[in-house]
Amino acid sequence: MFDEIKRKIIHAERINRDEALELFNTDDIHKLGELADEVSRRFNSNKVYFIVNRHINPTNICVNRCRFCAFSRSKGEEYAYELSIDDIIAQLREAQKTTGYISEVHIVSGLHPEWQFEYYLEMISTIKKEFPSIGIKAFTAVEIDYFARKSGLSIEQTLMKLKEAGLDIMPGGGAEIFNPEVRNRICPEKISGERWLEVIRTAHRLGIKTNATMLYGHVETYEDRVEHLMKLRELQDETGGFLAFIPLSYQPENTDIKVPYPSGIDDLKTIAVSRLVLDNIAHIKAYWIMLGEKLAQLALLYGADCLEGTVIEEKIAHSAGARSKKGNTIEELVHLIREAGKIPVERDSFYNVKRVFD
Ligand code: V47
């Protein structure tokens, strides 16, 4: 059977649900990696991308208290925080001082019970005004749905207002696992998988590119992962709006779902199977924050072609026990990519090439 899957992949034929499941069930991790690397080269030759960016989480106060999340707090709880727009601008200025410039800000927040939609619009437009050349990747589909419900606007109106304020692309978070039973166990208060897909479909229709994620390694099965990947592949066939897919390796500390960290083999397998199933998404990101720098480097030989970026200050994964650094330098990212035998390419938010490190 594996030979038949290999034949299909080599001939650029699409693999089906059962075949994807078989790939997850294989122990032949080397063969899987070899195939995924071949497909990765087809998409991106030998290039591996990274971006000079800063992550900012405006607040950890959240009305959804997902069981896998160690970052969120309720209003008034110890360690709850709120950033003002001035704080955010100051963090970006500081980041620019460190690296000389930044190409992107990545903004993901809690669902704050009191902040109005206007606050987010002002946040985006102020960032754009102060830093016109920085790409703004902001707000997951879950946040967009929340803004729409709070403001009484439609999803379309909410997204259009954000786009007009300066939003460039959207991060892929909030997808978790689409299967309703699993979703109900890990994040009962969160919007459904179908709703997540609907918000993203609307964004793509309005010309806003997004990423997609999958949170794996908690209570889900391989079947659930395959179902999740298939739904993303279907939507991408319809819209073409996904830039990158990012498998998020579960970090279990300080959370309500107490399981071991996913193993290195599971991490590599998930990257490789994602590359092989998502034959219509150009980029697979090895998120070094959750994988750790060394495994993320190895993932570049298992189908990944992007290492996220410099990040500077990561909070969500580190609240849950991520063992990586909180940020990385350009030199370190270039070194990791070069040592994997790949060509480091610095990109902008849309994967346009800014600099090639030959
Ligand atoms: O949706 C929360 C995840 C996501 C944990 O688009 C956890 O480039 C692991 O959107 N263990 C938000 N994961 C982060 C996000 C993101 C991250 C990196 C790149 C991009 C991108 C987007 O963080 C949430 C959730 O799935 N998360 N807690 C945890 N304990």
Image (cartoon, rainbow, N blue to C red):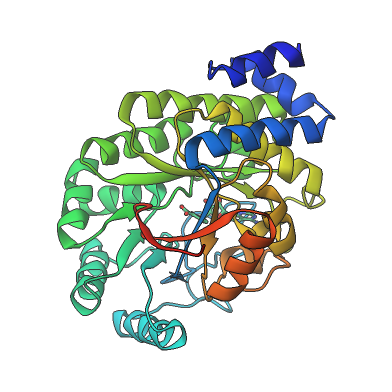
Extreme residue toward the right, this view: 27
Ligand 1 quadrant in view: bottom right
Extreme residue toward the front, this view: 358
What percent of the width, then of the height, locates residue 179?
57, 29
Viewed as shown, does residue 228 lie left or right of 185?
left
Q: Is residue 149 above or below residue 196?
A: below
Viewed as shown, does residue 267 lie left or right of 60?
right
What percent of the width, then of the height, locates residue 66?
58, 52
What percent of the width, then of the height, locates residue 25?
78, 25
Tell me the quarter of the picture where residue 196 sits: top left
Viewed as shown, does residue 134 lie left or right of 233?
left
What percent of the width, then of the height, locates residue 117?
24, 61
Which one is in front, 285 or 13? 13
Give the total number of marks visible in the rendering: 0
Tell me the quarter of the picture where residue 124 sits: bottom left
Which one is in front, 47 or 50? 47
Which one is in front, 206 or 142? 206
Determine the residue positioned at 58% across, 24% down. 227
Tell me the quarter of the picture where residue 4 sits: top right
In the rendered image, which quarter contains the N terminus?
A: top right
Is residue 239 in view? yes
Is residue 328 in view? no
Determine the residue positioned at 72% across, 45% down. 267
Determine the residue positioned at 57% across, 27% down. 277
Which one is in front, 122 or 21? 21
Viewed as shown, does residue 114 lie left or right of 229?
left
Q: Is residue 27 above or below residue 82?
A: above
